[in-house]
Amino acid sequence: DADGERLYKELLRCGVVVRFFGTQGGALSAHVRLSAPRSADVPRVLAAFRAARDGELAVQNERARVAAVAALDAREGERTAFLFDLDGVLADVSQSYREAIRGTYQHFVGRALAADAIAIAKAKGDANNDWVVTHRLIVAALGADAQHPSFEDVRDYFEKLYHGGLWRREKLLVSKRRLQALADVAPLALVTGRPREPDTRRFLEQYDLGELFGDRVVCMGDAPAKPSPAPVLLALQKMAIAPSPCVLFFGDTVDDMVAGVDAGVQPIGVLLAEDSDAAAAATTLSEAGAHGVVGVGVGDLIEHVVATAAVSSIDNPRSGGASGGGASGGGNGGGSSSGGGTNGGRDAGLQRVATVQRKTNETEISCVLNVDGSGKNSISTGVGFYDHMIGAFAKHGRFDITLTCKGDLHIDDHHTVEDVAIALGTAFREATAGAKRHRIARFGHAYVPL
């Protein structure tokens, strides 16, 4: 039972719809039930199973993958974007900024800094500025009664070490090729606590990343420091993008996660190579608001996002599709249909609508459909139960449907039922042609032998 309940909770965290029977007792008490409406969903369910089997780090990584892919599915009025902290996310600073903290501490305290002291300080939050963190560590080590160096003295010694050569040890954690591929999917921005000059500029020039970020770079002094959401919001302002779950912010600290949550975007945690307890570090980031945590660097996640976007562009091309042309009708008498109207989908201000007129030897049908309606409907087919069912379909699907049919009911109602279904299906096809099928997925299917 405990294993069944744990699996249930872990699958939920990975975004899989699942039912747990443990509360019902009986033979199924240790079982779960899940649904994969489409064959394309099966790999995702299997990935969630593997994550649940492999433990917390795997679950956090799968949560990050799910959040990243979901960010590609922008609703009307939303835009996808990817924001990055610099240190620990794109830049390995374990031998530069971290070493400057350790060297400055040893200079003023006279002994080495404990191996996990920086991680502990960062986990407490309000630790975006390394000069401040270093000064706090030194003051705490010397004790309340000792004479403390001033913040300015600590900062100046730190800068002496860093600009004296430690900056040369920084390495890029994610290749430019991967970042360029991601930039082809959605715009990128940088939100860092570094000074702009020369620290941030020099790193971007060193790895030729300037064009990828352009003027979408927020540095120390541009806005109040994280954990304030101000730097994240400023980056979005530079991009002319509103906060939404379709904006991901990759960071390695509690401050990054809090800033992302408060800014109204989805923060994704990134582990550091020096994390001695990766599971504990992941839990800390998750509790601070991370929608998943990935390992050192974000290269693998970027590859997954780029591959998903490539498949999506094939299935749902972004260029708007024109309304479909004529469709031959069924029924005994044959017929034709024509549709029109504008299609909505991703583009703000457009609606997914269609009008179908269909006339055969047995029926004459007029159907007006608005996929993005509110459930208003007026149905008149001459078959009372059919009117009721189409009305319920419109109401619960929030489709606006106006439909009339004059059929040969003096013979039977099956021509009316068949031809109305053809006309309504044609209207849906035309209203959601091309890219306008965005966010529509098969709910399920069944084979029913007769």
Image (cartoon, rainbow, N blue to C red):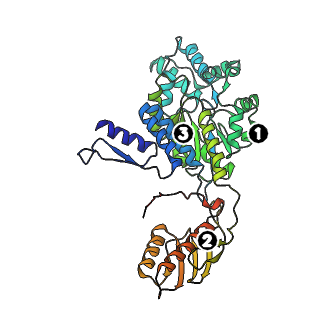
Q: Which mark is residue 211?
A: 1
Report how far apart the C-alphas of labels 1 and 2 lie in the structure.
41 Å
- Looking at the image, is mark 1 or mark 3 earlier in the sequence? 1
Q: Which residue is mark 2?
A: 353
Q: Position of residue 255 (x, y in %)?
A: 53, 37
Residue at 62% of width from left, 33% of height from top? Answer: 299
- Give the answer, above or below, for where 300 lies relative to 361: above
Q: Which residue is mark 3?
A: 268
Label 2 sits on a secondary structure element that is strand
- Looking at the image, is mark 3 or mark 2 earlier in the sequence? 3
| Left or right of 161 on screen, residue 414 | left
Residue at 56% of width from left, 76% of height from top? Answer: 331
Disc 3 marks which amino acid? Ile
Say which quadrant the N terminus sits in. top left
The crowding category of the residue bearing disc 1, from other C-alpha atoms within 10 Å (few below 14, some 14 to 19, many at least 20), is few
Label 3 sits on a secondary structure element that is strand
Residue at 58% of width from left, 31% of height from top? Answer: 129
Query: In the current view of this chain or complex, which residue is farthest to the left?
Result: 26
Disc 1 marks which amino acid? Glu
